[in-house]
Each structure stands twice: as structure tokens, then as C-alpha cells.
Image (spheres, rainbow, N blue to C red):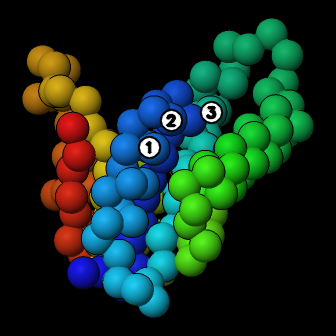
């Protein structure tokens, strides 16, 4: 059993996140904590240069607020009382790995899709987390 489980959830794959959350609940110590983590990807400066208007900070803030509300509602729906929600900015794999170390997590449970050809060249987020995370990683398909 684990005392601090980090569950990264992408807003575009919320159904996978629910399944992973249920798995986290089954692996959690009685006094443990589940941390739902969402990473809001930065729009790099190169991409912003091609936008007709400046990328509004309000859009980033709205994305963060939406993720926080969605994950808080998800925790309530599944009866998670011993948890919290964290929203971070940056590249998904790096942020997940850094957060796992910062939060002293002892398990990261991450959903993954079946790898396609492109994943063998650049690697999926799940494979980068599994390769570089300092705590245990469970990849759920």
C-alpha cells in the first residue's frame, strides 16, 4: 500500500483519469493521500508568434480554473476525502516527475494509450515519466 499517490490527469482524457483514480483508491493506505495533478501546457513563444492576437493570459487562467474545478468534482464524485488537486504549468513529463519528487510521492499512476510508431521516436508522456521518475510508476492502459 502507498501513502502518497500522484495521479496525473489530462482534461482531454478524463475517462481514463476516472479509472486511474479508482485504482489509486484501491492502493492507498488508510491514512494516505491522493494528489490529482493536471499540467497545463505552455504555448511556446514560437507558436505564439504565429497567432493573430496575443495569447491572452485569461485563457491560461480559465484553463487552470476549469481543470481545478473538474478534478475537485471528480474527487467528490469518487468520495476521495483524503486528497487534493494541483495544477501546474509546463511540459507534462518533466512537471510530473518534478512534482512527484517535490511532493514526496511514493507512487505515480498514469494512464497511457497504446504506443504508435511516433512514440518510438519521441516517447509518450507515460514512458518519459516511467523512465525518469524517482518513485514507483504504474502505467494503466
* Gap between marks 3 and 2 measured at Cα: 21 Å
Left or right of 61, for residue 1: left
Specify whether residue 71 is in view: no
Q: How many labels does the image show?
A: 3
User: Mark 1–mark 2 contact, CB under 8 Å?
Assistant: yes
Q: Which residue is drawn at 31% across and 66% down?
A: 26
**Element on which disc 1 rests:** helix
Quadrant (top left/top right/bottom left/bottom right) for the C terminus: top left
Nearest to N terminus: mark 1 or mark 3: 1
Q: Residue 17: which numbered mark, if any? A: 1
Q: Mark 3 points at which residue?
A: 43
3 vs 2, front mark: 2
User: Mark 3–mark 2 contact, CB under 8 Å?
Assistant: no
Question: Quadrant of residue 67 in the image?
Answer: top right
Nearest to N terminus: mark 3 or mark 2: 2
Q: Position of residue 110 (x, y in %)?
A: 32, 51
Q: Where is residue 84 in the image (x, y as percent from the top left)?
A: 62, 70
Crowding near the residue tagged with mark 3, few <14, some 14–19, many ≥20 C-alpha atoms within 10 Å: few
Question: Quadrant of residue 137 in the image?
Answer: bottom left
Camera-nearest residue between 49 and 85: 85
1 vs 3, front mark: 1
Camera-nearest residue between 107 and 73: 73
Q: Which residue is drawn at 29% across and 71% down?
A: 27
Q: Position of residue 47 (x, y in %)?
A: 61, 22
Q: Residue at x 62, y 51 (%)?
A: 77
Crowding near the residue tagged with mark 1, few <14, some 14–19, many ≥20 C-alpha atoms within 10 Å: many
Left or right of 120, for residue 74: right
Q: Name the residue under label 2.
A: 14
Amino acid at each position: 500500500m502507498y501513502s502518497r499517490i500522484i495521479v496525473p490527469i489530462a482534461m482531454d482524457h478524463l475517462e481514463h483519469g476516472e479509472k486511474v483514480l479508482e485504482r489509486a483508491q484501491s492502493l492507498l493506505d488508510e491514512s494516505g493521500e491522493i494528489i490529482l495533478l493536471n499540467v497545463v501546457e505552455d504555448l511556446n513563444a514560437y507558436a505564439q508568434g504565429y497567432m493573430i492576437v496575443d495569447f491572452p493570459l485569461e485563457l491560461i487562467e480559465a484553463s487552470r480554473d476549469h481543470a481545478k474545478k473538474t478534478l475537485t468534482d471528480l474527487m467528490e464524485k469518487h468520495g476521495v476525502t483524503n486528497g487534493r488537486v494541483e495544477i501546474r504549468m509546463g511540459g507534462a513529463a518533466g512537471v510530473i516527475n518534478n512534482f512527484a519528487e517535490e511532493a514526496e510521492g511514493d507512487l505515480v499512476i498514469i494512464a497511457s494509450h497504446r504506443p504508435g510508431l511516433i512514440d518510438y521516436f519521441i516517447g509518450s508522456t507515460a514512458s518519459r515519466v516511467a523512465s525518469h521518475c524517482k518513485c514507483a510508476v504504474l502505467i494503466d492502459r
